[in-house]
Image: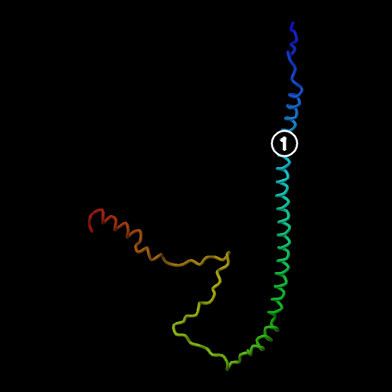
Amino acid sequence: MRQARTQAFRQAPWRIARQSTGRTLLGLVVVLVVAGMYLAVNARLAEAGRELLRLEDRREELIRETSVLGATLADLTTPNRMLERAASMGFHPAHAKDIEYLVIEGYAPPSGFHAPAPIGSPVAQRGGLSPAYTETLAEWMVRLVEEVRGVR
């Protein structure tokens, strides 16, 4: 049989209070550190969200401005408006007597456009051999035999 052991002395009450206070303060410090990290992360996230909203507003503003400028350009470049502006600057339609042609020696105009054949069209066969082939198989064999016999 076992006898239960009893502790010979008790902890002093001030020591027990100090240990429990230390544990409580340690827990409180841990909670405060975690809360501080949580707040820091949330502050960064909120700042990024505000920046995103600001950039989206700027983007919409730029899209509106681009649309207005495009409409203004389209209005300014209509044919009637261009003719009016040209007339106000002193331009007039050219007549045949107003046109001068210059002849430039040595100028070769670019060749006209040649459209490629459609994909399904047959390929035209070119007749004849390549210029690289200058002898037939029989001529080659005769030359080879002559070289082996030492005739040449």
Tell me residue 147's x, y (percent).
26, 56
Q: What residue is shown at x 23% (from left), y 55% (from top)?
A: 150
Q: Nearer the viewer, residue 97 or 21?
A: 21
Q: Residue placed at 73% from the left, 33% from the top?
A: 25
Query: Residue 34: where, in percent of width, then height?
Result: 72, 39
Mark 1, Cα crowd under 10 Å, few <14 / some 14-19 / many 20+, is few
Furthest-top residue in this view: 1
To which quarter of the image does residue 97 belong?
bottom right
The image quarter containing residue 119 is: bottom right
What is the number of callouts on the image?
A: 1
Q: Residue at x 73, y 45 (%)?
A: 39
Residue at the image point whose x is 47% and y is 80% from the top: 108
**How far from the left and from the top, in percent, is residue 79?**
69, 82
* Element under disc 1: helix
Screen quadrant of the C terminus: bottom left
Q: Nearer the viewer, residue 140 or 61?
A: 61
Tell me the residue that label 1 is attached to. 29
The type of residue carrying mark 1 is Val
Q: Position of residue 82 (x, y in %)?
A: 67, 83
State the residue in front, 148 or 70.
Answer: 70
Query: Is 149 drawn above or below residue 126 in the view shown?
Result: above
